[in-house]
Image (cartoon, rainbow, N blue to C red):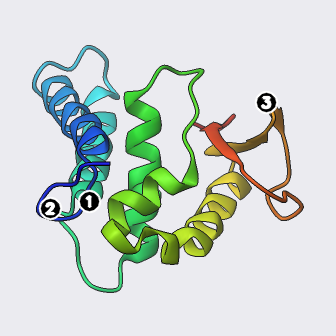
């Protein structure tokens, strides 16, 4: 997979940049009273995912922001792999971030922001063995 200078794979970078652009447009033309708040959260997540607001020690926050930004950009029924977030944040060393990515996914699943799926079925991440997918949860 081709990577940019900062190590983010180009397909994922394009998705995150598109999400940032969409969020900025949403902030400029709110259609509902809650739209500015939602747009602000979207902008913050996309910027953090892209490393624009990255601070050392914010690994978990950046992984979570990346997961949320990718899920927001995709269709509501779509899923992502935790490795997508690890690839964005970790660059060439993304495999080292798979355990932290699963921990962040567990936290987001615990609060209902996302659900964890295996073979299309919701599962408890603490019991999941093998590949998992992340989807929007009931508290999205």
**Dividing the picture into quarters, in which one does residue 133 lie?**
top right
Q: Are marks 3 and 2 in contact (CB under 8 Å)?
A: no
The secondary element bearing badge 2 is classed as loop
How far separated are the C-alphas under marks 3 and 2? 34 Å
Is 20 positioned to the left or the right of 80 in the image? left
Q: Most extreme residue toward the bottom, as rendered?
A: 57
Residue 130 % position (x, y): 78, 56
Labelled disc at residue 72: none
Camera-nearest residue between 111 and 82: 82
Q: Earlier in the sequence, mark 3 or mark 2?
A: 2
Q: Which mark is residue 52?
A: 2
Q: Which residue is depicted at the point 34% across and 36% down? A: 38
Element carrying mark 3: loop
Residue at the disc numbered 1: 48
Comparing 69 with 34, the one in front is 69
Identify the mark at residue 120; answer none if there is no mark: 3
**Mark 3: few/some/many CA within 10 Å (<14, 14-19, 20+):** few
Using residue 128 as the reference point, say whether residue 94 is left or right of it.
left
Instruction: Tell me: 15 left or right of 120.
Output: left
**Residue projecting furthest to the right:** 127
Q: Residue at x 32, y 48 (%)?
A: 1
Query: How far apart in space, not on screen, are marks 1 and 2 (Cα)?
Result: 6 Å
Residue 62 vs 76, above or below: the answer is: below
Q: Are marks 1 and 2 in contact (CB under 8 Å)?
A: yes
Q: Residue at x 73, y 57 (%)?
A: 110
Q: Residue furthest front?
A: 1
Q: Determine which quarter of the picture holds residue 61.
A: bottom left
């Amino acid at each position: 997979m081709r990577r940019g200078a900062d190590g983010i794979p180009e397909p994922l970078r394009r998705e995150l940049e598109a999400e940032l652009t969409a969020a900025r447009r949403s902030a400029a033309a709110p259609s509902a009273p809650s739209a500015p708040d939602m747009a602000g959260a979207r902008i913050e997540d996309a910027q953090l995912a892209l490393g624009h607001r990255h601070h050392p020690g914010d690994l978990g926050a950046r992984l979570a922001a990346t997961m949320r930004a990718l899920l927001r950009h995709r269709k509501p029924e779509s899923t992502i792999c935790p490795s997508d977030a690890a690839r964005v944040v970790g660059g060439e060393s993304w495999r080292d971030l798979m355990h932290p990515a699963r921990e962040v996914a567990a936290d987001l699943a615990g609060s209902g922001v996302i659900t964890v799926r295996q073979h299309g079925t919701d599962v408890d991440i603490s019991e999941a063995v093998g590949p998992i997918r992340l989807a929007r949860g009931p508290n999205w």
